[in-house]
Image (cartoon, rainbow, N blue to C red):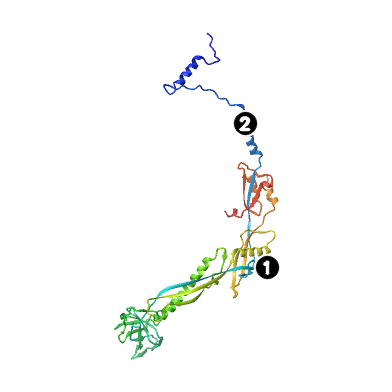
Amino acid sequence: MAKKMYDIIPVKVVERKEEDVESVGTEEVSHPIKTRKTFSFSKWWLLGIVFAFLLGIYFFVEGKAEVQISPKTEDFSVEEVAVTINSMESIIDYEKNVVPGIVFSDSKDFSEEYQATGTDDKAKKSTGTIKVYNKINPAKPISLIKGTRFLSESGLIYRADANFTVPAGKVQGGSFVGGSVEINVTAAEAGEKYNLSKATFSVPGLNGTEYYSNIWAETVTALSGGEESSVKIVTREDINSNEGAFEDKYIAEARQALINNVPKEFMYFEEYINPKMENISASAKEKEEIDKFTISGKTSVQATVFRKEDMASLGQEILKKQLSELKTIVPESVVFDVTEKKLNKDGKIEMKVVFKCKTYSMPENSIIMDSLLGKDKNNALLLLSNIPEIEKSEIKISPFWKWRIPKTEERVDVKINFGLGSN
C-alpha cells in the first residue's frame, strides 16, 4: 500500500495542537516543533566585506613611528670667570657678567627670662688663713694670683684674697725642707657648709703640671663666718654673661630664620649673613633683690641672594662662546663652582666662577632617516647603534601590529631624550 503524502497538516494534528495549548498549566506542556535555520548568503557577503576591510587596514594603512635617541655627551668647562652679584641690577648683563641680586631682610624682637644667681648682703662667706706648701725639687718659688682656687677634700672651693708667692724649699741639716707661706682665703660662696675647722687643699688650676702634686695647703685657723641667705640678687656677672648668651642665641636664630625664608631657586653665602643685635637690655639692675629678670633685644639681618637660573643662563652664554659650532649644550646641564668670593662695602659680591656643562652633537637628519625609513624595527636599532654620536635609542611603532617603520619622514617623529642612557 502506497504511503500517503500531505501538503497540509492533517486535521487530527491541528486538533491535537489545540488540545495541547489548552492543557498548558494543567497536566502537561506541549513541545514546539523545531525548524532548521539556514544562514543566508547576504550575511556571508557582509562578513567578507568586513574581513577585507580589516585586511586592507593591516597591509595598506601606513603606521607611525616614534624614535627616541640619546646622544653621547661630553663634559666641557671654561676657566675662571669674574662675575658680580649686584642688587641694583634687575636683569643679567651678559657683556659685563653681572647677575642681579635680591636683598632679603628681616627684624624681630626677642626676650628671655633668666635666674638671678647672687645673694644679698645678709649672706656671708667663710674666711680664714691657710698655709701653702711648696716641695718642688729642684727648689724654685712659685707665684700665684689673687683668686687662685683651693679645693678641699670635701669638694668646697676657696679663693686667695691677694697675689702671693710660695718660696722655694731649701736643704736644712742634710734634708730638703719645702717652702711655705700663709695666706688669707674666702669661700667661693656663702653658707655655713664652708665653715671648716681643719682641711687639706689642692690647687686645681695646677692640674696637669709638675707643680700639682708638690703644691698644697692646710688650714692654719678655722675657716668660719659663713652664713646662709635665701634672698637672691642680680649680679653684674648675671647681666653680662646672660646678655652674651642671649645675643649669641638669637643672632643664630635670626640667621636661620632668614635662611629658611630664602626660596630654593635662590643661592646665598651663609658667611655673608651677619645679623645684628640692637637695643639689648636687662629688666633688672645689679644687686636688685629678685629671683628672675628678663633680657630683651631686637635683631636685624639681611642677605644678598641671586637666582641659580640667572647664573646658569650667564654660564650658558659664556660656554657657547668657547664651544665648537658642532657641539650643543645639553639642556639644564650648566653648573658652576664659586672658587673665590668677596663682599664689598657697597653690598656687591665679586666672585671667580668656573662654569661647566655637558655637550653633544647629532648626525645630519638625512643619516638618521636613512637608518629608519622603511626598515624593520630591529634593523633600524642596529643601524642607529652604529652611528658614533648616538648612545642609545628606542623605537615605538603604531598600530601595534606594524613591525616596519613608515617610508615617509612625515610619519616618523624623532626626539632627543637624554634620559635613555641613564638606565
Determine the residue located farthest toward the bottom in the rendered image. 173
CB of mark 2 within 8 Å of CB of mark 1?
no
Residue drawn where x is 59% and y is 69% of the image: 339
Where is residue 52 shown, x and y percent of the image?
A: 64, 34
Which residue is at the front of the view, 355 or 380?
Answer: 355
Task: Name which of mark 2 and mark 1 comes first in the sequence.
Answer: 2
Number of the label disc, if any, that sits on residue 95: 1
Mark 2 vs mark 1, CA separation in Å: 75 Å
Quadrant of the rendered structure where residue 355 is? bottom right
Q: Residues within 10 Å of mark 1 (few under 14, many from 20)?
A: few
Number of the label disc, if any, that sits on residue 103: none
Where is residue 271 shown, x and y percent of the image?
A: 54, 71
Side of 127 relative to 45 (left or right): left
Determine the residue located farthest toward the left in the rendered image. 197
Q: What amino acid does circle 2 point to?
A: Leu
Residue drawn where x is 68% and y is 50% of the image: 368
Is 59 situated above or below 241? above
Is 234 situated above or below 325? below
Where is residue 396 shown, x and y percent of the image?
A: 61, 47
Side of 299 relative to 368 (left or right): left
Quadrant of the rendered structure where residue 363 is? bottom right
Which residue is at the front of the view, 318 or 165?
Answer: 318
Label 2: element kind: helix
Is 409 situated above or below 55? below
| Disc 2 versus disc 1: nearer the observer | 2
Label 1: element kind: loop
Counting the numbered discs, the total is 2
Determine the residue located farthest toward the top in the rendered image. 1
Which residue lies under the disc numbered 2? 46
Q: What amino acid does circle 1 point to?
A: Glu
Q: Residues within 10 Å of mark 2 (few under 14, many from 20)?
A: few
Where is residue 302 shown, x and y percent of the image?
A: 55, 71
